[in-house]
C-alpha cells in the first residue's frame, strides 16, 4: 500500500454490499469470511480500497442501515476476529478499507432506544432521540406532518410500559430507524468512540451515511418541508429544518480532529444530497475530506449534459480543495447497465413495478453505454466509486416477485415503490449451481438464470468481457494517472473528449453513428474500434503521438 496520506484523491473504491457478495457458511447471507475468500479477486481487479456497507448487528429493516450495535459484527456475518482477518487480508493485498457510519439514526433494537421507551417522557434516556407529544386532545395526532423518506409519516407513536399510548418519535427513514438527537453530548461522544474503535482496528476510513441530516431545527412552530423531498429535493441554502443545516459541520470538524490523530490520517466521504457548492463544505480538509458527487446518476446520456455535470463537480472539488468522486451505481439505485438500456425519461419505479417489461430494455445498448461511461469516469481526475457487479456489466433484476422484496420503501409506501432490492441480488461467481457460486445454501434474494452469462468465471480471461475491460482500465489508470486536471477538447457534437495532464486523451462518442478517430495510439477501448473511426457509444483512450 502506498504510504501517501493523499492516497484517496485518485483512488478507485469498490463498494461491497456484504450480505450479497459471498457466503462462506451457506446460510444464504453473504459474510465477512466470504469477502476474505474473494480478496484475490479484488486484488486482480486492481482497486485501491473497499467500502463495506453495514455489517453490524441489525434486524435488517433497511438492509443493515438500522444498526443495533455500532461496535460489533452481525453474528450472521461473522465475528470481530473475522473482521480483523478481512482487514489483514485486504491490507496484505494492498487494498484499503472504509466502513459505513450510520449516525443519523440507530435501529429501534439499539439498547439506547429500548432504554428510551422504558423511560418516562423528559428522562435523559429519551433525550438521545427525538420524542415529542402528539397533537390533538389525547395526543393522537403526530407532532407535525413531516414525511419520512420511505413514506408516509416521519413520526411513530410509542406505547408506554403500562400499555397506554405515549409520545411520538421522529424517524426520517423507517420507524425501525429512530433519529438520534445530535444535540445530546452523549450521542456525539459515543460516535467518537465508534470512530476510534474501527480506526484502532486498522480501518482506513469511513463512508458517512446521510451526512447532511444529523442536525435538525425542531423549534416551533414547525416549518413545513417539501413532500417526500427530505433527502433529494430541498432548497440549497441551508434553510431546510431537517437537511444540510450549517450546525452539522461542527460535528464533522470534531471528527476530523479524530481522523488526524492517526497516521496516515483516516479519510471519510460524505453521503449527502446537497448541491455541488454546499457539498464542498462536507468535503473540506477540516471536515470529512470528500463528498459523493451523485450528479451523474441522473444525467441523461447526452454529451452536453455529461460535460456540464462533470465540469460542475470539478468546480465543486476546486472549492473544497478535495477531489471529485465519480459514481454510476450503488445499492440505492437501478444498476446503470439497465438505466442506459432505457429511454432517459423512463420512470424507473414504474419500470420496476412492471417487472422490467414496460418498456423492454435494450440490454445491448445498456452494456455498450455502461462500458463507455465507466471508461469515461475512470479517465477523469478524482476518485471513482464502483458498485459490486458493475465490473461484470450486471443489469438490474427488475422482476423480483413481491413476496421476496425486503426494502422498506416497498412496505412503507404500500406497494407504490418497488424499492432497491433489484440491485442488491447477490453477484454471480460461477456459471452454474443454485446460487452461481455465491454460497452453498442459496441466496437471500433469488438470482435469475441469466446471471450465468455474467458470472466471473465466464468473463475471466475473455479479452472482450466487461470484467477484463475494468481490469485493463484500472491497470492502465495506475500507469497514466498524474496530476488532477484535464483540458477539454473543443466540442464535437455528441462527444465528450479531454486530454489529461500527462498528454493522453479520452474520447467518448455518445452518439449512435461513428466519428473519426483522432491521431494517437489506442491504449484501450470500451468496444470494437474498426478502421479509423470511434463507433457510437464507445470510449477510446489514446496516447497522443506528437
Ligand atoms: C442511505 C443509504 O445508502 C440507504 O441505503 C439507506 O436506506 C439510508 N441512507 C438510510 O440509512
Image (cartoon, helix red, strand yellow):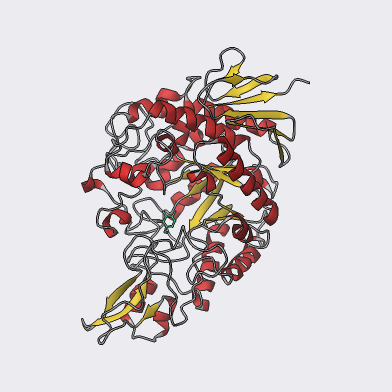
- The extreme front residue here reads 493
Residue 261 placement, left or right of 113: right
Instruction: Determine whether 87 is above or below 411 in the image.
Output: above
Quarter of the picture for ligand 1?
bottom left
The image shows residue 347, relative to residue 138, as above or below, that is above
Query: Does any portion of residue 202 appear in the rendered image?
Result: no
Q: Residue furthest top?
A: 531
For the point 54% across and 59% down, which residue is it? 274
Residue beneath the point at 31% across and 28% down: 450
Q: Is residue 230 left or right of residue 267?
A: left
Q: Position of residue 226 (x, y in %)?
A: 42, 65
Q: Nearer the viewer, residue 139 or 306?
A: 306
Residue 339, percent from left and from top:
42, 38
Name the image quarter holding residue 501: top right
Q: Position of residue 155 (x, y in %)?
A: 34, 72
Rendered position, 361 above or below 279: above
Q: Nearer the viewer, residue 426 or 509?
A: 509
Amino acid at each position: 500500500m502506498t504510504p501517501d496520506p493523499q492516497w484517496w484523491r485518485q483512488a478507485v473504491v469498490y463498494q461491497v454490499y456484504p450480505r450479497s457478495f459471498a457466503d462462506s457458511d451457506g446460510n444464504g447471507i453473504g459474510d465477512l469470511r466470504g469477502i476474505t475468500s474473494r480478496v484475490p479477486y479484488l486484488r486482480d481487479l486492481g482497486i485501491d480500497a473497499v467500502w463495506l456497507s453495514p455489517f453490524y448487528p441489525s434486524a435488517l429493516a433497511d438492509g443493515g442501515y438500522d444498526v443495533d450495535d455500532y461496535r460489533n459484527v452481525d453474528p450472521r456475518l461473522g465475528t470481530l476476529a473475522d473482521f480483523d482477518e478481512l482487514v489483514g487480508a485486504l491490507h496484505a493485498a494492498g487494498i484499503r478499507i472504509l466502513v459505513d457510519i450510520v449516525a443519523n439514526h440507530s435501529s429501534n433494537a439499539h439498547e439506547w432506544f429500548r432504554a428510551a421507551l422504558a423511560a418516562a417522557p423528559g428522562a435523559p434516556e429519551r433525550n438521545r432521540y427525538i420524542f415529542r407529544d402528539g397533537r390533538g386532545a389525547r395526543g393522537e395526532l403526530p407532532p407535525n406532518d413531516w414525511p419520512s423518506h420511505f413514506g408516509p409519516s416521519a413520526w411513530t407513536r410509542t406505547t408506554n410500559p403500562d400499555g397506554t399510548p405515549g409520545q411520538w418519535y421522529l424517524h426520517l427513514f423507517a420507524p425501525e430507524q429512530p433519529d438520534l438527537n445530535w444535540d445530546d453530548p452523549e450521542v456525539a461522544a459515543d460516535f467518537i468512540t465508534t470512530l476510534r474503535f474501527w480506526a484502532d482496528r486498522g480501518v482506513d476510513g469511513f463512508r458517512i451515511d446521510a451526512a447532511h441530516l444529523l442536525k435538525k431545527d425542531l423549534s416551533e412552530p414547525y416549518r413545513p418541508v417539501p413532500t417526500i423531498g427530505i433527502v433529494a429535493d430541498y432548497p440549497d441554502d441551508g434553510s431546510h429544518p431537517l437537511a444540510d443545516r450549517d450546525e452539522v459541520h461542527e460535528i464533522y470538524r470534531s471528527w476530523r480532529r479524530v481522523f488526524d490523530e492517526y497516521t496516515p490520517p483516516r479519510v471519510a466521504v460524505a453521503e449527502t444530497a446537497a448541491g455541488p457548492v454546499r457539498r464542498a463544505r462536507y468535503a473540506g480538509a477540516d471536515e470529512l475530506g470528500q463528498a459523493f458527487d451523485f450528479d451523474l446518476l441522473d444525467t441523461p446520456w447526452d454529451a452536453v449534459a455529461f460535460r456540464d455535470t462533470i465540469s460542475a463537480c470539478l468546480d465543486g472539488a476546486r472549492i473544497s480543495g478535495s477531489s471529485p468522486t465519480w459514481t454510476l451505481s450503488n445499492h440505492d439505485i437501478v444498476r446503470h447497465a439497465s438505466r442506459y438500456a432505457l429511454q432517459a425519461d423512463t420512470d424507473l419505479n414504474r419500470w420496476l413495478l412492471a417487472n422490467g417489461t414496460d418498456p423492454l430494455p435494450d440490454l445491448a445498448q445498456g452494456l455498450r453505454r455502461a462500458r463507455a461511461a465507466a471508461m469515461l469516469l475512470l479517465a477523469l481526475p478524482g476518485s471513482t466509486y464502483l458498485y459490486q457487479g458493475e465490473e461484470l456489466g450486471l443489469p438490474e433484476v427488475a422482476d423480483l416477485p413481491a413476496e421476496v422484496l425486503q426494502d422498506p420503501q416497498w412496505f412503507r409506501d404500500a406497494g407504490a415503490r418497488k424499492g432497491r432490492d433489484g440491485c442488491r441480488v447477490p453477484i454471480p461467481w460461477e456459471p452454474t449451481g443454485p446460487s452461481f457460486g455465491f454460497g452453498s445454501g442459496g441466496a437471500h434474494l433469488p438470482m435469475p438464470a441469466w446471471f450465468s452469462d455474467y458470472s466471473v468465471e465466464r468473463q475471466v480471461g475473455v479479452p472482450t468481457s466487461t470484467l477484463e475491460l475494468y481490469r485493463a482500465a484500472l491497470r492502465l489508470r495506475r500507469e497514466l494517472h498524474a496530476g488532477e486536471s484535464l483540458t477539454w477538447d473543443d466540442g464535437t457534437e455528441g462527444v465528450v473528449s479531454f486530454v489529461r495532464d500527462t498528454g493522453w486523451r479520452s474520447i467518448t462518442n455518445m452518439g449512435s453513428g461513428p466519428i473519426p478517430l483522432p491521431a494517437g495510439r489506442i491504449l484501450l477501448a470500451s468496444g470494437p474500434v474498426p478502421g479509423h473511426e470511434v463507433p457510437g457509444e464507445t470510449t477510446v483512450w489514446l496516447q497522443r503521438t506528437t
